[in-house]
Image (cartoon, helix red, strand yellow):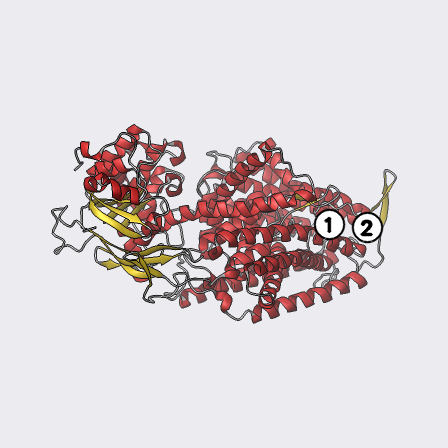
Amino acid sequence: MHVPDGFINAPVSAVAGVVAAGAVAVSLRGARRELDERTAPLAGLVAAFIFAVQMLNFPVAAGTSGHLLGGALAAILVGPYTGVLCVSVVLLMQGILFADGGLTALGVNITVMAVVTTVVAYAVFRGLVKVLPKKRRSITVSAFVAALLSVPGAAAAFTLVYAIGGTTDVPIGQVLTAMVGVHVLIGIGEATITALTVGAVIAVRPDLVYGARGLTAPLKLRVNGELVDAPAAEPEPEPMPVAARSPRKLLLAGLGTSLLLAGFVSFYASANPDGLEKVAADKGIDAKVEDHAAADSPLADYGVEGITNTRVSGGLAGVIGVGVTVVAGTGVFWAVRRRRSSEAGPTSVPENV
Amino acid sequence: MGAGHAHKLYRHGHSPVHALPPHTKLTAVFAFVVVVVSTPREAVWAFALYAALLGTVAYAARVPASFLLKRLLIEIPFVAFAVLMPFVAQGERVDVLGMSLSVNGLWGAWNVLAKGTLGVAASVLLAATTELRELLLGLQRLKLPPLLVQIASFMIRYGDVITDEMRRMRIARESRGFEARGVRHWGVLAKSAGALFIRSYERGERVHLAMISRGYAGSMPVIDEVTASRAQWSYALALPCAALVVCLLGWTL
Amino acid sequence: MDPVTDVTDVTPSLVPPSLDVAGLAFAYPDGHQALFGVDFRLARGERVALLGPNGAGKTTLVLHLNGILTAGAGTVKVAGLPVGRQHMAEIRRRVGIVFQDPDDQLFMPSVREDVAFGPAAAGLKGAELEARVDRALERVGMAEFKDRPPHHLSFGQRRRVAVATVLAMEPEILVLDEPSSNLDPASRRELADILRSLDVTVLMVTHDLPYALELCPRSLILSDGVIAADGRTGELLADDELMRAHRLELPFGFDPRSVTMGA
């Protein structure tokens, strides 16, 4: 699902870049509460793991294959904020090192594959964990469902982006059905792997699962062979789980995103078939797509008003768009960095450039 | 294992391109791709010029064409899609060899192929001439938030660990006659994923403990300072600047 | 189990002990408790072996010594400084841990950079850093391998470099986790010579009993998460009942009574 350079037009890439930069900035702030000295490498491992399993294509059906997106796994293992950072780092490194996904399409890729999957997955996960009985099995089940839904969610988000800013008119129509169908299949694979991974980790090292923290027995001392309760000293060595914090904001955000997606996607799917196709091809689907009428999307004619030469106008829009991405991205990072350095208290994660 | 070890895409060498400080190269590649993407797709000759520019860089970096072309294969999924485009896109149609193709789709395919390929080639060149650790230092110098750099460096460290474990587990699976062929093998693959995670984590955790035991506190200590001189900057930025000229010509001609 | 305090000639009252562990208890987050109140002291300059069967909590204890794990109850003091969040950097400089697998310890692309990692993290730069690296490598006899990648060295050489990475930080106490594991006899001999030549406090975690006897005048036995015995190494190893009770076995044909004790 990695979008290459030139696939999505410049203005939409720029907007996606702004959205991605914003999401990463928010996550950086949030991640400080999720990460400490011991969990920072876990985030790195999750990133590496996602990197690895994204290369591990698994067979879906009829000769097609798909790869994991990993957002759900990341959110459950290291928390939603760190999860977004993990997948973003994976995408950044894939772009730089393996040229997998264009550098200018990084915003699109991060928005779709890091932000949407993580937010959808974590919202579903927290919701289910709240409802289900407090057992380890519930966590595995929640992980399964969360991962299952996150993949079609990302597919839909991608569809939306392409519908708005695809550089080529490719009909959607039935593609939406095909897309979601295939991604539900891929989602099952993702869900299986996510649930088994989370299940395996929770069985051996429950301390590594962000979503399942806070189960400890009181300490004992062995005095002349007898066990006695240790005097209550400092609390848990691990920093207290952030999971206890109100997940409501996140839930609301997830709900909002889902609604927005659902609304937009169905709108474009019915009224303005334009370009869902690409993920389909990327995933290797040979689905036959019927031609649809209606070509113009309201955003297809992107231009700068007052300039009559369409090429110049469109080009200006492109250049402006790209400029905006760069400026906005840099601006957000700077703002966050300044804020962070001024806030940096003794509680912050060790950080220095 | 270790962040500094050469990765598979890296091609050891001592060319002037290898010697450039990583942050100048990162900036140059990013600027180049931005310029390429904002070029009108109708200016076909401009893309030829871009390719020539990259060719020059590859020559200066002494990266052989075969190496570059092999790495370009990563693009194949998109090529497949691009080939599909002229058939499915709508709008005006032309007949080529008896097939009815969409003009818009043809342009779209060309657009994706040309820009995508150039982007991939630029990244491949960057990866071929820059070591991983250098890339991270470069990102750090370009003010990427330290937390992201930290996650990235752990990711690379664990990357080796995971590939190692994965290979060992695959050998173990295959020596027992297993081969993933369809849906019914998901279970095995998924269980491997869980085991892989724990194995790699525990291995990496030990490395990390060794690191913090020696005073690691979130960022790699700078042992050899990397700075870029004005000359090095201008050398690196020659690529995107030349590209920008081509791009501007593309818009005006 | 009476502590032996007269093994060294250093008067403990003047200098704070290199290591002072009191009432240390710890449970892992999964609920498994590994330490149940560990007490012991190491005077400056002592070389002490920490013996115990697999699963006795040896590695868990080691991870408390530089604050990687934080005590659930009890205290650890290094040269008088309590292990805790506020002095973490200083504690980690003072306590040098050499882990069991040198591949875990060596993660930089060259020996030089690996040895420089610790001092550089502590803020050392330039010529001073170089000098520190050279001195540490010299002490383990690995100076000529400075620019080699660690994974191209033999296992014994890697372990020596691992010791150098820690020595470069000029620690107060050197903690070695199974230093003799996987070493061939010659490498084992060389490492012993190096350890004997160092003038720092050494805590050697091992179940290689002859090696403990050779290098450490005093030994502690950790069993079931507490210190079960503390005394002269030769006497402990000769106590068959004690050894059996804590699943410690001497190699076939080895009699500690027939060996002249190491310095």
Q: CA distance from mark 1 to mark 2?
A: 10 Å
Q: Which is more toward the observer, B64 or C2?
A: C2
Side of B204 relative to A175 (left or right): left
Across and down, in percent, residue B229 comes to 42, 46
Q: Residue at x 73, y 67 (%)?
A: A263
Q: Earlier in the sequence, mark 1 or mark 2?
A: 1
Task: In this rendered view, identify the residue nearer to me: B10 or C235.
Answer: C235
Q: Nearer the viewer, residue B57 or A144?
A: A144
* Residue picked out by circle 2: A289
Say whether residue B237 is visible: no
Any part of residue A31 in sight: yes
| Residue type (three-letter) at the residue carrying disc 2 | Val
Q: Going 21% across and 41% down the picture, which residue do you hit?
A: C233
Q: Residue A351: which quarter of the image?
A: bottom left
In which quarter of the view is residue C160 placed? top left
- Would you say B238 lies left or right of A225 here? right
User: Which chain is indicated by disc 2?
Assistant: A
Q: Position of residue C224 (x, y in %)?
A: 33, 51
For the residue labelled by badge 2, is the local secondary structure a helix, a strand or a loop?
loop
Q: Horizontal placement of C171 versus A159: left or right?
A: left
Q: Amino acid at mark 1?
A: Ala
Q: Which residue is under mark 1?
A: A280
Q: Same subunit under labels 1 and 2? A: yes
User: Which picture quadrant has residue C150?
Assistant: top left
- Which residue, as the protein is rendered here, is positioned at the far right? B98
Q: Chain under label 1?
A: A
| Residue C24: x %, y % from top left | 30, 58
Kindly check if marks 1 and 2 are in contact, taking CB atoms under 8 A apart as contact: yes
